[in-house]
């Protein structure tokens, strides 16, 4: 019989793990499996691993040890997270929210034995998508139009700006309505992350309040990085928000990001800029930072942000005012900023104020700053977001980042299911 792939998916969604077997090989035969994918940004990715079949001529990727390749320990998702961009390929057209097709190619030396494709959805076909560009708002509302009012979650991206839909689309696929909300860097919104008005979040809440699909009594917010800072801040100001999740978030308000951001707050409310942390940084840290900048090496902002926050109590977010439970996720090797320490500041403040609702900080010690929807490649630990050649170090390693993303996402879903779909939010 011809060698075959056998793929089992409990769900077509990208956040679901799968089973992957190869059968009908010769006993103890060495073969290569190559994976190829074009993502929704038009970038081509590939990975490869060499395996030896067992005595029955089979390979179970959950237990098989790669002989060589782009990952080195048994992992059924290894071929997916260990992909790297094909460097000589130019990105193709963007295809937002299109199902991702990963082609798996089984080879014996240069001979192709069989090929299969794994299709994974980033949004359920049962979810309706409505672009929003009204009342000064820019976003996308993902909802279940025929299900009546449902718990609704505002989803905020980070300092990359613009509109990022993946997290909101995938979360909506699990029974919520979600609003992916841009707050700068697109359309008529502010060009830079500087003095962004919290009034904008208030306007978005008002829009949801007038939407018959949104159950405004069960409103959550989920933010990543600077969006996590904004999520905590928004929930501390608007008591209608009843549950908060922050990925690599900050419980401290920091300066804005942009050409006009020097000594300017990230946020304002009712026309008043909010206090922000910008404390003294030791000369040694500044010197090390400047050396990396001038040499073109990836830059870690971790220590700079840490020193900025030292003693800056007036810049801490009044998280004790949040009228609901809080879940914080961080990486212990976050090199963009110290989200683990900043999340602990939140926990300390909640504890000091005897916060009556559930709160938890989950830290993944070996992961970095990159917490996104699971199932995508995690090999990129350096980003250049500003187009000026500056490279930012994110931290972590591909394997631990992937595992942390899957675990964090499962915890996020459990959290919102528990605290937005039940009648009681009180501490357990």
Image (cartoon, rainbow, N blue to C red):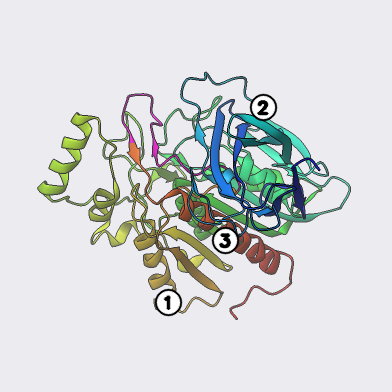
Q: Which residue is mark 1?
A: 351
Give the mark count. Answer: 3
Kind of element beneath mark 1: helix
| Image x and y of residue 352, in percent | 39, 77
In the image, is residue 145 part of the stretch drawn in magenta?
A: no
| Image x and y of residue 174, in percent | 74, 54
Say which label, 3 or 1, has the lower sequence index: 1
Residue 38, relative to residue 422: is it above or below? above
In the image, is residue 379 part of the stretch drawn in magenta?
A: yes
Q: Which residues are magenta?
A: 375-391
Mark 3 vs mark 1: give the one in front.
3
**What label does residue 95 carry, if any?**
2
Q: Main secondary structure of the magenta part?
A: loop
Q: Quadrant of the N terminus?
A: top right
Residue closest to the eye, 237 or 86? 86
Kind of element beneath mark 3: helix
């Amino acid at each position: 019989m011809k060698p075959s792939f056998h793929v089992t998916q409990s769900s077509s969604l990208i956040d679901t793990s799968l089973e992957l077997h190869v059968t009908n090989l010769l006993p103890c035969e060495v073969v290569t499996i190559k994976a190829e994918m074009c993502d929704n940004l038009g970038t081509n990715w590939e990975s490869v691993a060499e395996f030896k079949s067992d005595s029955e001529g089979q390979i179970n990727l959950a237990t098989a040890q790669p002989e060589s390749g782009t990952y080195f320990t048994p992992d059924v998702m290894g071929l997916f997270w260990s992909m790297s961009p094909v460097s000589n390929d130019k990105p193709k057209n963007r295809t937002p929210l299109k199902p991702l097709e990963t082609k798996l190619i089984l080879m014996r030396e240069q001979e192709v034995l069989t090929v299969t494709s794994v299709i994974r959805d980033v949004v359920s076909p049962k979810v309706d998508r409505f672009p929003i560009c009204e009342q000064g708002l820019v976003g996308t509302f993902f909802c279940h139009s025929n299900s009546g009012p449902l718990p609704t979650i505002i989803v905020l991206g980070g300092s990359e700006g613009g509109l990022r839909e993946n997290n909101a689309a995938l979360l909506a696929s699990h029974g919520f309505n979600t609003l992916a909300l841009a707050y700068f860097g697109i359309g008529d919104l502010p060009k830079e992350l500087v003095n962004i008005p919290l009034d904008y979040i208030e306007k978005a809440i008002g829009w949801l309040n007038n939407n018959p699909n949104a159950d405004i009594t069960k409103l959550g917010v989920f933010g990543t990085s600077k969006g996590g800072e904004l999520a905590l801040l928004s929930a501390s100001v608007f008591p209608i928000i009843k549950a908060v999740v922050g990925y690599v978030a900050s419980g401290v308000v920091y300066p804005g990001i942009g050409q006009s951001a020097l000594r300017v707050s990230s946020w304002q409310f009712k026309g008043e800029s909010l206090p922000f942390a910008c404390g003294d940084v030791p000369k040694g840290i500044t010197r090390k930072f400047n050396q990396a900048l001038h040499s073109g090496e990836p830059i870690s902002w971790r220590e700079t942000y840490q020193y900025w926050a030292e003693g800056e109590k007036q810049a801490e977010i009044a998280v004790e005012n949040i009228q609901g439970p809080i879940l914080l996720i961080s990486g212990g090797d976050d090199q963009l900023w110290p989200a683990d320490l900043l999340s602990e500041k939140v926990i300390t403040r909640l504890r000091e104020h005897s916060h009556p609702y559930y709160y938890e900080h989950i830290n993944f010690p070996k992961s970095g700053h990159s917490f996104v929807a699971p199932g995508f490649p995690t090999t990129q630990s350096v980003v250049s977001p500003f187009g000026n050649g500056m490279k930012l170090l994110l931290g972590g390693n591909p394997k631990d980042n992937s595992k942390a993303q899957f675990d964090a996402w499962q915890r996020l879903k459990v959290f919102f299911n528990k605290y937005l779909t039940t009648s009681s939010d009180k501490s357990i």
